[in-house]
Amino acid sequence: MAPPARRPPAGRGRVLGARPWVAALFLLPALVLLGALVVYPIGYSVVRSLFDADGSRFVGAHNYGAVFSDPGTLTAIRNNAIWVVVAPSVTTALGLIFAVLTERVRWGTAFKLVVFMPMAISMLASGIIFRLVYEQDPARGVANAVITGVHDTFAEASAYPGARPRPGADLAPSDGGGYTTRTAARPGSPALLPLVGIAPGKLPSGVADARPPAAGDGVRGTVWLDFTPGGGGAPGVIDHGEKGLKGVTVQAVRDGRVVATAKTGADGTFTLPDSAAGARLRLPAANFATAYDGVDWLGPALVTPSIIGAYVWMWAGFAMVLIAAGLAGVPRELLEAARVDGAGEWQVFRRITVPLLAPVLVVVAVTLMINVLKIFDLVYIIAPGATQNDAMVLALKLYLTSFGGGDDQGVGSAIAVLLLLLVLPVMVFNIHRIRRETRR
């Protein structure tokens, strides 16, 4: 005969029976907030997307047709796809590299602090910072200041960018951006080559007053700035106070071949050997090349990659911290066993570290994908007005359509629903992943 079942202690059944109601009571405030801040706005946006701009007339799916027929929205969808693929991948990869490398240096904690510090800066502040970093003018933009500094170290800039011949002078444009005389040079006949288009204050140091070439052998001439301070003077004539242009390269060209070369002195004079007689004089384009002013970071071609770079700068620290936390839980004996078996560091990293960190890497990547689908601040602040359409993303398009001048909340709501539909698959994948991890 089976022993009688033990009865639960007094009151225990009542507590167990009431537990679902107690849980519902405690969840009620959260559910109310969730409904008010999430469910209701989603439902309202779906309904609003079926009405016209001012919400007075039902238009059905017309707004969705307008969304997919608008080139600006299609550009935004394309850019969102670029963001979802590039930004999380690069950020996660950098976070992984930083997390692994900082384990091997004594100052790893300080490095992590520096890399994570941008997370303390708001998107607004980061956008302003990188708008200045990407300025085209090297005197203001840090990126172009570095690039032009490196460029000018290896490629000498011209002294007279943008200079051109005085109208009516003997010089005419030639191939490649230089200037060539129309008549051939003759010994004993001074070759006067007047130039304009140079601000007197921009002349290099050491220039002297221009003067006619001295008499002598060979072909002689003067290159000078044909501009008299204070006005006056005759065109094509070396007047008092006009400056010579030193360091200008002068070539004697015959039958397309350079037969002699000279450089002007401080007073602009130059002398070519007798072999230059009968040749035409050419001022090569290298004398007048405009200064290299760096990369057009915020131009149509690079504006989206540039903004993604700013995003990576902000979020690489977030990825590094999460991955470093996962890396701390990797069994060290597995790594040491692999090294003892003869595996190199790259093999240990690729075949052991990365597979063991795969769950953490997925968490980081999925979190960043959800984040970049809603990107707005950086694009709105960094992209200048001229290229904002080239950098357009869905969240910014939604804002501009609804509140930023478009005043069409019907189409704006349709864009919001589209953005929700794009986020949902990532969120569903994340929920399934969390449940799968919980069951383990």
Image: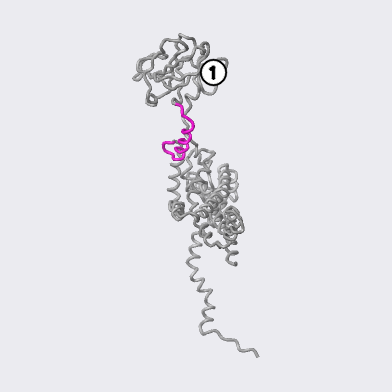
Residue 381 drawn above or below residue 239:
below
Which of these two is toward me, 220 or 301? 220
Residue 57 at least partly seen: no
**Dot 1: element:** strand
Instruction: Return the residue at label 1.
Output: 258
Q: Residue at x 38, y 15 (%)?
A: 211
Q: Is 214 left, or right, of 376 in this rendering?
A: left
Q: Is 127 left, or right, of 415 in this rendering?
A: left
Q: Amino acid at mark 1?
A: Val
Which of these two is toward me, 221 or 260? 260
Whether residue 170 appears in magenta in the rendering, the answer is: no
Q: Residue at x 62, y 89 (%)?
A: 3
Instruction: State whether the magenta stretch is mostly helix, strand or loop.
Output: helix
Which residue sits furthest left?
A: 230
Q: Residue at x 48, y 32 (%)?
A: 292
Residues in magenta, as a range = 138-158
Residue 176 drawn above or below residue 51:
above
Quarter of the image for residue 268 reads: top left
Residue 90 drawn above or below residue 278:
below
Which of these two is toward me, 408 or 146? 146
Residue 75 position in % (x across, y down): 57, 43
Residue 174 at least partly seen: yes
Residue 364 position in % (x across, y down): 54, 56
Which residue sits furthest top?
A: 188
Residue density around tag 1, few if under 14, some if 14–19, many if 20 or more, within 10 Å: some
Quarter of the image for residue 214 reads: top left
Residue 229 position in % (x across, y down): 35, 20
Quarter of the image that includes the N terminus: bottom right
